[in-house]
Image (cartoon, helix red, strand yellow):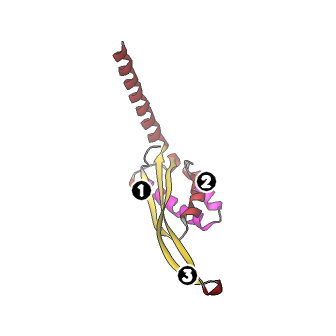
Amino acid sequence: MEKAQVYAKHKRARVSPKKVAIVMDMVRAKPLEEAKMLLSFDSTKAAKMLLKVVKSAEANAVNNNNLKSEDLYVSEIYVDPGKMQKGGRAGSKGRYDPLFKRYSHLTVGLSSKEIAKVAKEDKVAKEDKKSKKVSKGEK
């Protein structure tokens, strides 16, 4: 997949990366409107956080890059683990039970369908030129 045109990030989100990854798989490579609809009907904390990031990326695309929101799709979406807040509590038999409060860095990248088509056509044209050069060299 090509690199996204517009990004939005949420650093130090107080949700486990493992839980966010499940929600991210639902909206990966979906059109923007469909992704927002899926996230708005999901009741998890991760979905609510992701919806804010997706809306922020849409606002960045429309206001900063003059792209149409109808042409946008989620081209890149991933989660990175953040710092862990380590603590603990008393366990059974006088032991210590560790607690890890995990944080995440959420990243959403949007691209325009029109620009993606043009880039794909350019890539195919370059490959055709290379294959013609190779075939001329063989003769």
Question: Above or below — where is 102 with respect to 67?
Answer: below
In primary-sequence order, the first of circles 2 and 1 is 2
Between circles 2 and 3, the one closer to the viewer is: 3
Q: What SS does tag 2 mark? A: helix
Judge from the rendering whether residue 113 lies leftward or rightward of residue 37; answer left or right: left
- For disc 3, the marked residue is 88
In primary-sequence order, the first of circles 1 and 3 is 1
> Disc 2 and disc 1: Cα gap in Å?
26 Å
**Residue 120 x/y as whole percent:** 45, 35
Residue type at mark 2 is Met
Between circles 1 and 3, the one closer to the viewer is: 3
**Residue 4 x/y as whole percent:** 44, 49
Which mark identifies residue 26? 2
Residue range highlighted in magenta: 34-62
Where does the C terminus fall, quadrant-wise?
A: top left
Q: What SS does tag 3 mark? A: strand
Answer few, some or many: residues within 10 Å of disc 1's Cα (few below 14, many 20 plus, some between 14 and 19). few
Q: Where is residue 9, by image quadrant?
A: bottom left
Residue type at mark 1 is Asn
- For disc 1, the marked residue is 63
Answer few, some or many: residues within 10 Å of disc 2's Cα (few below 14, many 20 plus, some between 14 and 19). few
Residue at coordinates 50% horizontally, 54% vertically from top-left?
A: 77
Residue type at mark 3 is Gly
Residue at coordinates 60% horizontally, 51% vertically from top-left?
A: 34
Residue at coordinates 43% horizontally, 56% vertically from top-left?
A: 7
Q: CB under 8 Å between callouts 2 and 1? A: no
